[in-house]
Amino acid sequence: MLYSLLSVMAPMLLGAQVLLTLVLVKGDICPGQRGRIHKVLPVLAILWVAVASLKVEAFLVVFALLYFYSQVQTKKTRQEGPLWVMYLADGLALAFVAILITETVNWSASLSLLSLIFLLGALLGHLLLTIARTRLQAFHRLLPVMGILSAMIATLCIVPYSYQLDAQSLSALTQPLLISFSLLVIGIVVWCWHLLLVKPVSKGQLLLAQTLILAAATGFHHLYL
């Protein structure tokens, strides 16, 4: 199960990195917001250190992120810093995830991992942007919608895989599958809670959704092993 957890963390981190890079490059953010976004980058680096227990190549992403962090301000700043280093970190993360995808046992598992870039990545990015107190309100609506669509793809990937199993194997996987699916549905509802109640999003809400959906994704990935 630990292998599955670390495997799904890689696409999650890739998605979050790309989202933060997009905000830093294209986002209409003030100097205070830019500094606060810089401040959350070590979170990604720490999580990549954990992923490096799968493959040491993940340390390349860690070094790139930490170098970029060392070159930027974490207070109010208009300086973008060496964005080419951030692009490099994103490219290295993409290559790492691509390797994981090519090593999966079948195409269903590959597509499932790919969908997690948009599901878990969007959620972690949403959480980090909320922690950084960005005023990009559109993301509070768009990212949950992206999550719903990605969750549907991740769930549908199980269907063709299940047809390849014999009756005994399918019976053994039924309960774990239902548990993972339940966690996913609850996590999506929690993620979208601010939209349902028309209220501001909270860090606690997103952290709970992150925990639930990460657990669900780990369970789904474990089914393919």
Image (cartoon, helix red, strand yellow):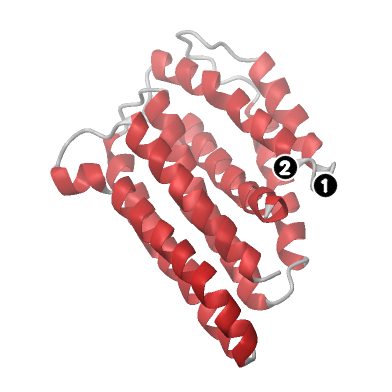
At 28% from the left edge and 49% from the top edge, which residue is drawn?
Answer: 192
Image coords of residue 167 (percent x, y): 60, 91
Badge 1, how many Cα within 10 Å: few under 14, some, many 20+?
Answer: few
At 70% from the left edge and 63% from the top edge, which residue is drawn?
Answer: 101
- Give the CA distance from mark 1 to mark 2: 7 Å
In the rendered structure, which amino acid carries the disc numbered 1? Lys
Q: Quadrant of residue 114?
A: bottom right
Is 188 left or right of 154, judged from the image as shown? left
SS state under label 1: loop
Badge 2, how many Cα within 10 Å: few under 14, some, many 20+?
Answer: many
Residue extending farthest to the top is 75
Above or below: residue 11 compared with residue 125:
below
Image coords of residue 64 (percent x, y): 74, 30
Above or below: residue 59 compared with residue 174:
above
The reply to whether callout 1 and callout 2 are in contact (CB within 8 Å) is yes
Q: Of residues 180 and 115, which is closer to you in this image?
A: 180
Q: What residue is shown with label 1?
A: 55
Rendered-image quadrant of the C terminus: bottom right
Rendered-image quadrant of the N terminus: bottom right
At 56% from the left edge and 65% from the top edge, which residue is drawn?
Answer: 220
Image coords of residue 153 (percent x, y): 46, 70
At 39% from the left edge and 45% from the top edge, which residue is drawn?
Answer: 209
Above or below: residue 159 compared with residue 12:
below
Q: What residue is shown with label 2?
A: 51
Q: Of residues 182 and 26, which is closer to you in this image?
A: 182
